[in-house]
Amino acid sequence: MPQVMEFKLPDLGEGLTEAEIVRWLVAVGDVVAVDQPVVEVETAKAMVEVPCPYGGVVTARFGEEGTELPVGAPLITVAVGAGAGSGSPAPEETERSGSGNVLVGYGTDHSRTARRRRVRPGSAAPVPAGATAAAAAPVATAATTTAAVTVTAAAVPVAAGPVPVISPLVRKLARDHGIDLRELRGSGPEGLILRADVEAALRAPQQEPQPVAAAPAAAAAGGERIPLKGLRGAVAEKLSRSRREIPDATCWVDADATELMAARAAMNAAGGPKISVLALLARICTAALARYPELNSTVDLAANEIVRLPAVHLGFAAQTERGLVVPVVRDAHVRSAESLSAEFARLTEVARAGKLAPADLTGGTFTLNNYGVFGVDGSTPIINHPEAAMLGVGRIVAKPWVHAGELAVRQVVQLSLTFDHRVCDGGTAGGFLRYVADCVESPAVLLRSL
């Protein structure tokens, strides 16, 4: 006789405590294999497909798309064992060994206690989606006992199916204005609902305000209230922590990048994969960090020690639809300019698709921030905690410049270095920045250290 196993939202790592259901990948009644992805969730850092450690038949799903769940809340229940589906493992074997999946704290540890599920004001508590009231009632009772929520199976109408929308920004826009995405007809490929479709619905005069949208719109000050959560909340917390803990200082210098741009043009004209400006700057950074290792370090407050790190894991700022993220290029110090270009391109593409794994966004030791892409010349970057420094690069633009004793029009860039004053003094920071500027102005300087 099959046994119903409850699969809870696992710990996705790096201190993440909650996730939002983006898209269900299975329906009630589907047969799933061990480690088959069953749901796509959005954390504060990335989109993640969550695999289930049980094989069998899905008997219930908990939460509709757009629902935010805490770690430890039920996701689905699966009937495993005899008659549950071809190839399903015995429940006792699954319980004993787990799936071996690599998600942090996942699969093999069943000792985690469940946490109270957060229910948004004005909304009913969730029940398994896609099940009939009669079939879902026993499972809902067990699940809601675990999640400390009391609910009857008939409290929420059954969803007709997944909403054809991918972008979390589109879902948030609809939620904030009380628009039911299931009532919209998408103009994108295969009926995909786009932001323009939601905005068109907002302009439609026939829609009446819905109760869900009334609460945030009724702010006493009359202004729009935007929840500081998800990626924006994670960024806010990290930047605030950086300001609280790190005594930072900034120095900057203008550099003539004409020779660097000419060298890049010559490299790309020689054939082979194209080399990006960011890759050349990254290669210069790794060479500078080899000379000034103090800036490739972190401060251990508990031990009251500065820890100099042996490898350079280079973070770089990437603007995406979800906001600013900082993917990390592992072992940047041993990569060529060509390898760096390829890895920057790959991670940027994955970031814009919202598919970065938590491991892609953590473990950086130094960050390169090219804010010149926004058309600005300078900035005072905030250090990406717990790193010790960040190099900011402004736009490369034609400016009057004294070259070889004469006034000329040259390609000029402003470089800014923000550093943790605990790990070094101004002389070290200035030496690092001056070396970077010298390499930018005369790439032959870099060849001496290769």
Image (tube, rainbow, N blue to C red):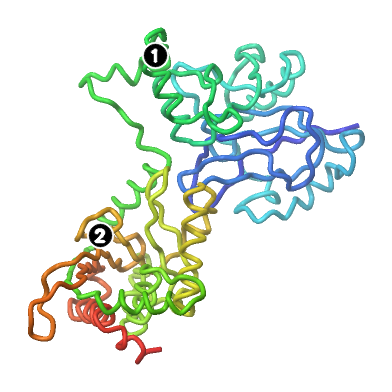
**Dot 2 alpha-carbon crowd within 10 angstroms: few under 14, some 14 to 19, many 20 or more:** many
Quadrant where the C terminus is found in the figure: bottom left
Q: How many marks?
A: 2
Quadrant where the N terminus is found in the figure: top right
In three-dimensional space, the C-alpha distance between marks 1 and 2, rounded to whole angstroms, equals 42 Å
**Dot 1 alpha-carbon crowd within 10 angstroms: few under 14, some 14 to 19, many 20 or more:** few
Depth check: give the residue in front, 256 or 363: 256
Closer to the eye: label 1 or 2 = 1
Q: Earlier in the sequence, mark 1 or mark 2?
A: 1
Judge left or right: residue 184 versus residue 237: right
Judge left or right: residue 246 versus residue 99: left
Question: With respect to residue 252, does 226 lie above or below?
Answer: above
Question: With respect to residue 445, does 409 lie above or below?
Answer: above
Q: Residue furthest bottom?
A: 448
Give the image location of residue 242, x and y in percent. 29, 57
Give the image location of residue 446, x and y in percent. 33, 86
Q: Residue furthest left?
A: 406
Give the image location of residue 225, x and y in percent. 30, 27
Residue 381: which numbered mark, if any? Answer: 2
Q: Residue at x 64, y 44 (%)?
A: 50
Depth check: give the residue in front, 180 or 248: 180
Depth check: give the residue in front, 32 or 298: 32
Residue 204: which numbered mark, if any? Answer: 1
In terms of secondary structure, where does tag 1 sit? loop
Q: Amino acid at mark 1?
A: Ala
Q: Amino acid at mark 2?
A: Pro
Residue 230: which numbered mark, if any? Answer: none
In terms of secondary structure, where does tag 2 sit? loop
Q: Residue 279: which quarter of the image? A: bottom left
Question: With respect to residue 377, does 169 lie above or below?
Answer: above
Give the image location of residue 88, x and y in percent. 86, 42
